Amino acid sequence: MSESTEIVRIAARGDGLTVDGRHVPGTAPGDKVASDGSITPGPHHVDPPCRHFGKCGGCQLQHCDDAALAAFVTDRVVHAAEGQGLAVGTVAAAHLSPSYSRRRATLHSVNGGGGRALLGFRESGSHRLVDLAECPVLHSDIFTAAKALRGLLSARKRRFAADIELTLAEQGVDAAIKGLTVEGLEQTEALLDFARSSGLARLTLDQGFGPEAMWEPEPVTVALAGVSVPLPPGAFLQATADGEAALADAAMTWLQGCATVADLFSGLGTFAFALAGGEGAKVLAAEASRDAHLACKTAATRAGLPVYAMHRDLFRNPLLGEELGRFDGVLLDPPRAGAREQVQRLADSTVGRIVYISCNPASWARDARALVDGGYRLAELRPVGQFRWSTHVELASLFIRE
């Protein structure tokens, strides 16, 4: 009889990890791995809900139950903190977004055999496409639009390779296609007829000269904390409304009572509008993207909320100590690389509370180390898994000046 070892947790890239440090793909905590490589499923191993799992690169953890997924999300965040020698005051239970909740996704499409276009995610570690027949991650409206686009693209005769970004807005699905060439009146009318009949909120085409709106019967907006905000093509949006709400709830809870807040890397105003709602704070929303900045400014004016939009590149021109000292609290939600320069200014500041939202535990932990070295205490962490079944993890964290 062969000896076996147990999977104790999921490693950062989705492989199961044994007690003796071996990585075993496709396993969940509690699985038994025999010396011959055979796997005996444990209590946290479940049947994947999607027929494409194992081939499609969109998901890595569909074989894990919710308890294992929550443990993975929490471990990623806690291990990142521990790697920087950080003491964490409180770690909240991980929040997992439900299935069929993804409101934005980037799909790919190419000519397929038999006069049919392929449309879907790429295979793991490959440029080959998985032609999606189902997807328990995507919101049903996004998947319906994807199927309709496959039909449209299947009618094209010439070879193509296109990237398709789909976003669920208040008016419906916003579709942006990059890499598809449209020539002549007939092809243009076919696109417009498709957008009309499919009920798209907007159809944008990038033929190599930047995005051009081909169809937009009314201005496209997205609801952020109940405020309708213009949605520029390609603007950043949290992947699920559920995950956005979880992150915003953490921010509002931790910054409650702050009369003035600086929202740094504010984007469209995801957190600014949440913090300024009701009897909330006066919020400075600083953002480098001009389109996002203008959208936030327009929405704040229309809603009559105390959100003051500032067009500023915080990488090249971070807020300095004197500026930061005017605020009771600061929220920052930087890109994946983190915000080294701005964080150093914060570490030297007198701000009482800092809420750091991150989509990259590694860069967050590096920045968190700088804040702690500057005299802040990491009071609380909230892990968030809004990219369900993937290894992508987000978090909200609270730092308090000691």
Image (cartoon, grey):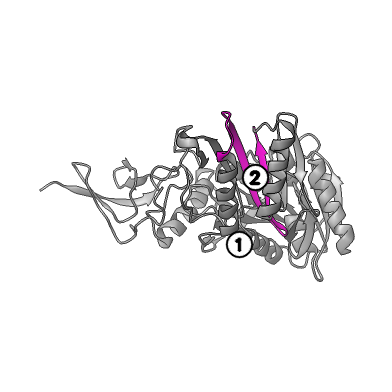
Q: Which of the 4 image quarters holds residue 208?
A: top right
Report which residue position mark 1 lands on. 242
Rendering coords of residue 351 (x, y %): 77, 53
The secondary structure making up most of the magenta span is: strand
Query: Residue at point 37% right, 51% down?
Result: 9
Q: Mark 2, mark 1: which one is toward the viewer?
A: 1
- Is residue 360 in view? no
Q: Which amino acid is tagged 1?
A: Asp
Instruction: Point out which mark residue 373 bears.
Output: 2
Choose the circle earlier in sequence order: 2 or 1.
Answer: 1
Q: Would you say 389 lies left or right of 194 here?
A: left
Reply yes or no: does residue 28 show up in magenta: no
Q: Which amino acid is tagged 2?
A: Asp
State the extent of the magenta-drawn residues as a range. 154-179
**Residue at the outermost front position:** 186
Q: Secondary structure at mark 2?
A: helix
Rendering coords of residue 245 (x, y %): 65, 63
Q: Give the crowd class for mark 2: few <14, some 14-19, many >=20 residues within 10 Å.
A: some
Query: Residue at point 64% right, 54% down?
Result: 377
Q: Which of the 4 image quarters holds residue 298?
A: bottom right
Rendering coords of residue 232 (x, y %): 77, 46
Q: Secondary structure at mark 1?
A: helix
